[in-house]
Image (cartoon, rainbow, N blue to C red):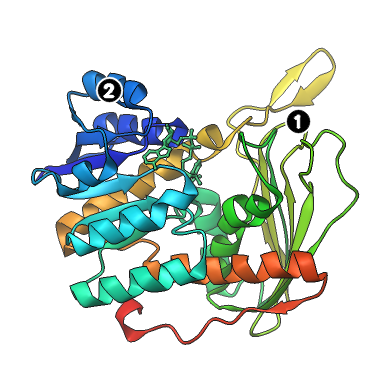
């Protein structure tokens, strides 16, 4: 079948996903969309021959819409996801699933009432070739049991309105998810260090930050989150195991030798660095709906685990000490 997708939010990533669903993903098309900025959404709707609605709720309740993709700002996610679940519609929600663990619990409760998994969270690093290879190296046992991870997430500049709390809850949340996925275990505790502040950061923004995470088996991860790198978008991850190490390579296709230099270019933002991962992510989402009538990617539980961790790290930034990460048992429904 051809899946008719309703899109809520046609800003930076929303427009990218609309293009992707229309031009790249097989078995789907964009049927309806909306955005708080009606003018921008109407233009996108015209370009892709989709219905335009003033509100996200109208997109969700359009009978011709089979599944919804949410790409509006973080605080609006939980409300739209709940509306989709109550309407019995599949929903792909950009990260984070919500801005607090409590909101994720409400979504879990409604999804369990619906009786089947409807929600997938946009943790696209799980679809990146490099991270997938790292995971299979860990699973193979080639480098022995993992002991430590050294990671960094650097943005050229933060998005508009970026706050100190968003460094963990909006950006760091990618690392929180992908590291627990790589290791296949949950976190025990977390801490946030605040190094010397970058003078290029906007007023009031504590940047950079370092997240320190310890898993239940004792693996330690240090993650630099740096929103004003000054040079590009740079994602790094190195796993140190008992017998060896494995790390992401810098994504590049050509090394240039010129004028006495040898170099390759780095990307400037997420849309370039993870372009292929987003393609795979949305294609696998549609495939799983078609083949299993259920999403196979990151679940509401994964969204919840990430938010519980992010909430603890927010507390840790304020308390200045390590905080417990109080995640209960994963319900059978999500295993
Ligand atoms: P953006 O600010 O470029 O776009 C957001 C759009 O939502 C705007 O067009 C705005 O008019 C619209 N909007 C605002 N309030 C709304 C509401 N209540 N209902 C419907 N539309 C509303 O932001 P961007 O960068 O596109 O981010 C959107 C979401 O996607 C965020 O939650 C962000 O965390 C996530 N994101 C995920 C990425 C990933 O790598 N997975 C990368 C970039 C963003």
Q: Residues within 10 Å of mark 1 (few under 14, many from 20)?
A: few
Where residue 289 sits in the image (x, y, percent)?
20, 57
Nearer the observer, disc 1 or disc 2? 2
Asked if disc 1 and disc 2 are in contact, CB closer than 8 Å, the reply is: no
Q: Quadrant of ligand 1?
A: top left
Report the residue that reaches farthest toward the right: 196
Q: Residue at x 30, y 19 (%)?
A: 43
Q: Quadrant of residue 104?
A: bottom left
Q: Indicate the quadrant where residue 33 lies.
A: top left
Which disc, if any, is residue 206?
none
Q: CA distance from mark 1 to mark 2?
A: 35 Å
Query: Viewer-proximal residue, 208 or 293?
Result: 208
Q: Residues within 10 Å of mark 2 (few under 14, many from 20)?
A: some
Q: Quadrant of residue 334?
A: bottom left
Identify the residue position indicated by label 2 in the image.
42
- Tell whether 244 sits left or right of 115: right
Q: Is there any visible trace of residue 306 in the rendered image?
A: no
Write the residue at 47% across / 71% down. 102
**Residue identified by numbered label 1:** 231
Using the image as rendered, state which of residue 323 and residue 86 is in the foreground.
86
Nearest the camera: 56 or 301?
56
SS class of the residue under badge 1? loop
Residue at image coords 66%, 76%: 144
Q: Is 228 drawn above or below residue 98 in the view shown?
A: above
């Amino acid at each position: 079948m051809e899946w008719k997708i309703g899109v809520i939010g046609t800003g930076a990533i929303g427009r990218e996903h609309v293009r992707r669903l229309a031009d790249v993903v097989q078995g789907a098309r964009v049927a309806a969309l909306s955005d708080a900025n009606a003018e921008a959404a109407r233009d996108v709707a015209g370009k892709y021959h989709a219905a335009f609605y003033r509100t996200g709720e109208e997109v969700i309740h359009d009978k011709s819409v089979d599944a919804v993709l949410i790409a509006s700002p973080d605080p609006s996610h939980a409300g739209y996801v709940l509306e989709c679940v109550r309407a019995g519609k599949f929903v792909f929600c950009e990260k984070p699933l919500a801005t607090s663990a409590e909101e994720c619990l409400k979504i879990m409760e409604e999804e369990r009432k619906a009786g089947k998994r409807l929600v997938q969270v946009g943790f696209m690093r799980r679809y990146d070739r490099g991270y997938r290879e790292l995971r299979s190296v860990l699973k193979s046992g080639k480098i022995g049991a993992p002991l430590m991870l050294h990671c960094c997430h650097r943005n050229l500049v933060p998005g508009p309105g970026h706050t100190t709390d968003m460094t963990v809850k909006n950006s760091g949340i990618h690392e929180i998810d992908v590291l627990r996925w790589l290791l296949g275990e949950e976190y025990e505790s977390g801490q946030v260090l605040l190094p010397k502040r970058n003078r290029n950061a906007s007023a009031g923004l504590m940047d950079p930050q370092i997240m320190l995470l310890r898993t239940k088996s004792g693996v330690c991860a240090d993650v630099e989150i740096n929103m004003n790198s000054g040079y590009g978008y740079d994602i790094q991850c190195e796993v140190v195991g008992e017998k060896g190490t494995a790390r992401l390579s810098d994504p590049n296709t050509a090394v240039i030798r010129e004028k006495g230099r040898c170099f390759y270019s780095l990307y400037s933002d997420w849309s370039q660095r993870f372009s292929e991962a987003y393609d795979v992510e949305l294609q696998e989402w549609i495939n799983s709906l078609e083949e299993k009538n259920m999403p196979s990617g990151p679940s509401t539980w994964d969204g919840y685990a990430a938010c519980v961790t992010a909430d603890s790290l927010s507390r840790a930034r304020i308390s200045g000490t390590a905080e417990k990460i109080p995640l209960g048992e994963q319900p059978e429904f999500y295993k």
